[in-house]
Image (cartoon, grey):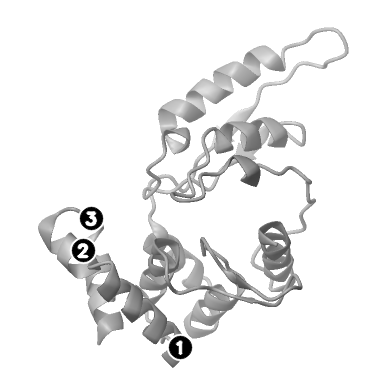
Amino acid sequence: PAAAIEEARVKEQVKAGLIGEVEFENFNLGRYEDKKTFALPLRNMFLIALASYYGDVVVLGSTAEDVFLDGSERFMRSMEFALKIAWQTQLGIDGKTVKVDTAFKGLDKRNLVNLYTSLGDKRKRLNGLAINTMSCYQPEYFGVADDYMECMNCMSCLRKYTSLVAEGYELTNLQQFGLSMYIQREMIVERLNSGELIQPKWFKKAVLDILG
């Protein structure tokens, strides 16, 4: 179900003009994912290696908020070195050099939302991002690829919607209710105040705006 949801999301993004045409690979890394933390060791290594078959520039969407080491600049340069060895001219292989582009590494989610919405009608683009993107760890799934709902009950949903709210997005009543319940249950404000949870200043303001 998760793979079907992701594929449907990407197709909707293509249809909405958020991204160009894509080719789908049946490459199931989800079986290695930690079901409690959703961590997936070596994910970017596999994705970069696979992408290198399609070209010599791999654009990775790592952001300033990434906490896993396979999203670090050190890891990217190490991957470039490994691919340089693997893709050098040899029997049956025409040599090439692969570059890993991490253009978004210095930006957080709000920066990215601001960058995208500045290119057109801001309200329309904010609504489009809310509808046509999926960050949820555990979406509620109803049996067909496009029949699902974000849980509004995980940190990934909270990060997505705080970045939208910080740029002026107006939550639906259902979104606000779900996120408010999550914020209170997980004591997000208290953890921000104590320093246990480290986030940009805009994140806390957006959390308080969601709580009303």
| Outermost bottom residue | 173
**Residue holding disc 2:** 201
Instruction: Name which residue lies at 49% across and 25% down.
Output: 77
Query: For the view shown, which residue lies furthest in the front direction?
Result: 36
SS class, disc 2:
helix
Q: Position of residue 65 (x, y in %)?
A: 37, 50
Task: In this rendered view, identify the residue nearer to me: 183 or 54.
Answer: 183
Horizontal side of 90 relative to 30 (left or right) equals right
In the picture provided, is 107 more to the left or to the right than 189? right
Above or below, 117 against 2 in this view is below
Quote the CA–CA distance across marks 3 and 2: 12 Å
Q: CA distance from mark 1 to mark 3?
A: 25 Å
Q: Dot 2: few (<14), some (14–19), or many (≥20) neighbours within 10 Å?
A: few
**Residue picked out by circle 3:** 197
Q: Position of residue 204 (x, y in %)?
A: 23, 68
Q: Residue furthest top?
A: 91
Is disc 3 placed on a helix, strand or loop? Answer: loop
Q: Picture coordinates of residue 142 (x, y %)?
A: 69, 76
Q: Are marks 1 and 3 in contact (CB under 8 Å)?
A: no
**Residue 116 in the image, given as x and y percentages of width and height:** 50, 67
Dot 1: within a 10 Å radius of its alpha carbon, few (fewer than 14), some, or many (20 or more) residues?
Answer: few
Provide the secondary structure element on which disc 1 rests.
helix
Looking at marks 2 and 1 on the same chain, the residue that comes earlier in the sequence is marked by 1
Judge by depth and name the residue closer to the eye, 145 or 160: 145
| Amino acid type, callout 3 | Leu
What's the residue type where badge 2 is placed? Lys
Identify the residue shown where x is 72% and y is 12%: 88
Residue 179 visible in image: yes
Q: Which mark is residue 174?
A: 1
